[in-house]
């Protein structure tokens, strides 16, 4: 009988460094049985919504996510079944027609800003992490990322941050910190915390005789 996969949740605000933490853990165990599942891929399908309305989508609100599908896929992976992960098209502001085949693995890292907000997701996680980074660093990282990778203007980034990102963070993301087993300050630059997490995961894997 196969062992139940380990699920590690990595949450935190936009620009907190949660993706860096996730990748650091993933890279350490690369070559072993591990996968990353990003909540960003599970934004709701909006193909039936007029494009002008899609432009108003609040991507930092819990209702933007299709957690029912994410939960269904997590349970399938836990049952050692493959899934077809959705792909989100940010230019069209809806789900792409393409999907990505994901095979089950022994370690699943679930990463996203609001993965700790849904109790159903929390209950599946074996370890819950919250990457806690000061607001000034988060906004600087977001400005840099959006200007370089998404071609956005400085003014549009600031306007979105003040009108949507900041209030959503304070209302929905920050409160989920209380659900975390471990809080990691400064994200991917906190090598001590990452090493401790790697050691913890290694121990669990050895106890389950996976490695």
Image: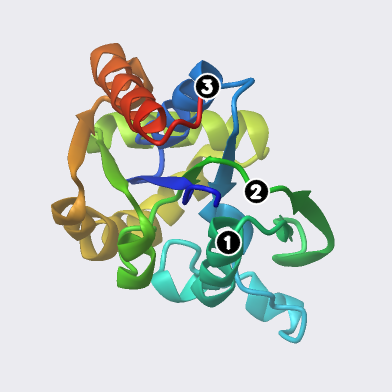
Left or right position of 52 against 202: right
State the residue lying farthest toward the right.
97
Q: Which residue is mark 3?
A: 29
Crowd class of label 2 (few under 14; some 14 to 19; many from 20; radius 10 Å): many
**Colour pattern:** rainbow
CB-based contact (under 8 Å), mark 1 and mark 2: yes
Does residue 1 lie above or below 53 as drawn?
above
Q: Earlier in the sequence, mark 1 or mark 3?
A: 3
Residue drawn at x 29%, y 27% is: 200
- Counting from the top left corner in percent of width and height, residue 70 is at 55, 66
Left or right position of 146 against 140: right
Q: What is the spatial separation of the Cα atoms under label 1 and label 2, in whole angstroms?
A: 8 Å
Is 76 in front, or is 175? 76
Q: What is the spatial separation of the Cα atoms under label 1 and label 3, in whole angstroms?
A: 21 Å
Label 1 residue SS? loop
Left or right position of 32 against 209: right
Does residue 130 lie above or below 194 as drawn?
below
Is 88 in front, or is 204? 204
Q: Which residue is mark 1?
A: 79
- Counting from the top left corner in percent of width and height, residue 157 is at 49, 46
Q: Earlier in the sequence, mark 2 or mark 3?
A: 3
- Counting from the top left corner in percent of width and height, residue 49 is at 71, 84
Q: Please name which of the two marks, 1 or 3, marks the residue nearer to the observer.
A: 1
CB-based contact (under 8 Å), mark 1 and mark 3: no
Q: Which residue is mark 2?
A: 104
Is 205 in front, or is 144? 205
Q: Earlier in the sequence, mark 1 or mark 2?
A: 1
Label 3 residue SS? loop
Label 2 residue SS? loop
State the residue lying farthest toward the left.
178
Is 87 in front, or is 49? 87
State the residue lying farthest toward the front.
1
């Amino acid at each position: 009988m196969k062992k139940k996969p380990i699920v590690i949740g990595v949450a935190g605000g936009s620009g907190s460094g949660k993706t860096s933490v996730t990748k650091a853990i993933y890279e350490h165990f690369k070559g072993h049985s591990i996968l990353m599942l990003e909540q960003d891929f599970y934004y709701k399908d909006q193909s039936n919504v007029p494009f002008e309305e899609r432009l108003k989508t609040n991507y930092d609100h819990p209702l933007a996510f299709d957690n029912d599908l994410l939960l269904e896929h997590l349970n399938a992976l836990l049952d050692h079944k493959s899934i077809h992960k959705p792909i989100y098209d940010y230019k069209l502001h809806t789900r792409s027609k393409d999907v990505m085949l994901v095979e089950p693995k022994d370690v699943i890292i679930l990463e996203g800003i609001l993965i700790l907000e849904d109790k159903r997701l929390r209950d599946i996680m074996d370890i819950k992490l919250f990457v806690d980074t000061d607001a000034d660093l988060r906004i600087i990282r977001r400005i840099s990322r959006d200007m370089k990778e998404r071609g956005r203007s400085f003014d549009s980034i600031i306007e979105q941050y003040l009108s949507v990102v900041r209030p959503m963070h304070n209302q929905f993301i920050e409160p989920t910190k209380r659900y975390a087993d471990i809080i990691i300050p400064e994200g991917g630059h906190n090598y001590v915390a990452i090493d401790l997490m790697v050691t913890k995961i290694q121990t669990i894997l050895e106890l389950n005789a996976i490695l």
